[in-house]
Image: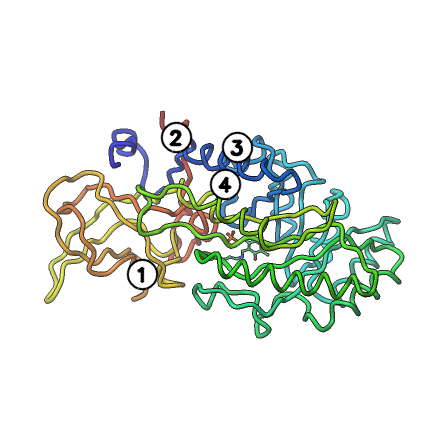
Amino acid sequence: MKDSFPIEKFKTVKTPFYYYDTDLLRKTLDKIKSETDKYGNYHVHYAIKANANRKILRIISAAGFGADCVSGGEIKACLDAGFPADKIVFAGVGKSDWDINLGLDAGIDYFNVESIPELEIINQLAGEKDKVARVSFRINPNVGAHTHANITTGLAENKFGIAMSDMEKVIEIAASLQHIEFVGLHFHIGSQILEMEDFMVLCNRINELQAQLERRHIQVQNINVGGGLGIDYQHPNEVPLPNFEDYFQTYRKRLNLRPDQQLHFELGRSVVGQCGSLITNVLYVKQATYKQFVIVDAGMTDLIRPALYQAFHYIENLSSNETKETYDVVGPICESSDVFVKAFGLNRCHRGDILALRSAGAYGEAMSSGYNCRELPKGYTTEDLA
Ligand code: LLP
């Protein structure tokens, strides 16, 4: 699959940089649309935290998706990229007054509220503007997911959401507040989830909670199940599209939606993950006592996932077809954790070779930093390098 990269163009661009295969992005968006169109009441909000590159956002908004934001800055980026305000939802445990006011002024669809104090502040700020804020409550379903501990969010011990035992109380409080309209329930159990079982457990929990509310004659307009669908980091070439069919079908089969109820999703990684690669240059090949290091010009500042979550990104040497050798691929940052992969087979490397770190479209560029006074990596699309 190396041939699918515009390697000659890569040689003319300063590394490291992100490369986005927009054909794959469009294919992914088409697949999501064709799967959700089967159901009629499914709405996908792209979780912009995964990748807020302007060109990527424009493609996703042009395809008709909504957006899931976690800061006022993200709401602004979405509005700039053409997402309609009434398709924007806004989550986060620590929304500042500035964030909330921005959401109110823009007229976003609803706030995913994570605590009673937050609800009261939204009511107050909406009151000052003589507005009514639509809110959905993020309920912590106490459901574990089979993923990395740092990216599970739905356990009682996590900081996210309102405890299930407080759900009725918070809905009652909302009914008493003049500038609040309660519109739904929100859940999110974690990220990079590949086992449909985990989503089934969430569905069962939501079914129980809905039944509990109905006993008290409480109606919910929409259910938002968050994101979390994982991608195949081991096989980016063989499995470029996540399993959207099973994912959406799991919710159809397991979640008891009421007539007219709308189902909202907040997908991030599964939308943009496979279309992005971090492109980097080999600076040095260093023979150490027990192993060989390939030292590249990208570091943990450009892609922090391996250092932060021990995440694996498949790497290809785009410049060489020589026999494979075993290397540790490391960056130039002054941190021992600045390692992309250990003992990995790559076609024999030489100074100047171009490597692609695959499946880096989600939480790659978006999480880059300027540590060590480094420049932030730029992002280029297929069109940019045509
Ligand atoms: N909705 C909420 C409320 C979330 O917190 C998240 C992700 C999403 C949706 C989107 O989840 P996705 O579909 O992308 O799994 N930086 C980590 C991932 C952090 C995810 C945070 N929340 C990583 O690089 O693996």
- Mark 1, secondary structure of its residue: loop
Does residue 102 appear in the picture of this structure?
Answer: no
Q: Where does the N terminus fall, quadrant-wise?
A: top left
Quadrant position of residue 6: top left
Residue 53's tag is: 4
What residue lies at 47% left-to-right and 32% top-to-bottom? 26
Between the residue at mark 2 and the residue at mark 1, the CA separation in whole angstroms equals 28 Å
Between the residue at mark 4 and the residue at mark 3, the CA separation in whole angstroms equals 10 Å
Q: Earlier in the sequence, mark 1 or mark 4?
A: 4
Residue bearing mark 2: 382
Q: Which colour scheme is used?
A: rainbow
Label 1 CA crowd tier, 10 Å (few <14, some 14–19, many 20+)? many
Given this view, does label 4 or label 3 mark the residue nearer the observer? 3
Q: Which of marks 2 and 1 is nearer the N terminus?
A: 1
The amino acid type of the residue labelled 4 equals: Asn
Q: Vertical placement of 141 versus 370: above or below?
A: below
Label 4 CA crowd tier, 10 Å (few <14, some 14–19, many 20+)? some
Label 3 CA crowd tier, 10 Å (few <14, some 14–19, many 20+)? some
Does residue 256 appear in the picture of this structure?
Answer: yes
Q: Vertical placement of 228 versus 273: above or below?
A: below
Residue bearing mark 1: 338
Residue bearing mark 3: 59
Between the residue at mark 3 and the residue at mark 2, the CA separation in whole angstroms equals 12 Å
Q: Which residue lies furthest to the top in this view?
A: 386
Q: Which of marks 3 and 2 is nearer the N terminus?
A: 3
Residue 125 in the image: state x and y as whole percent: 81, 56
Q: Vertical placement of 238 versus 213: above or below?
A: above
Residue 31 in the image: state x and y as whole percent: 49, 36
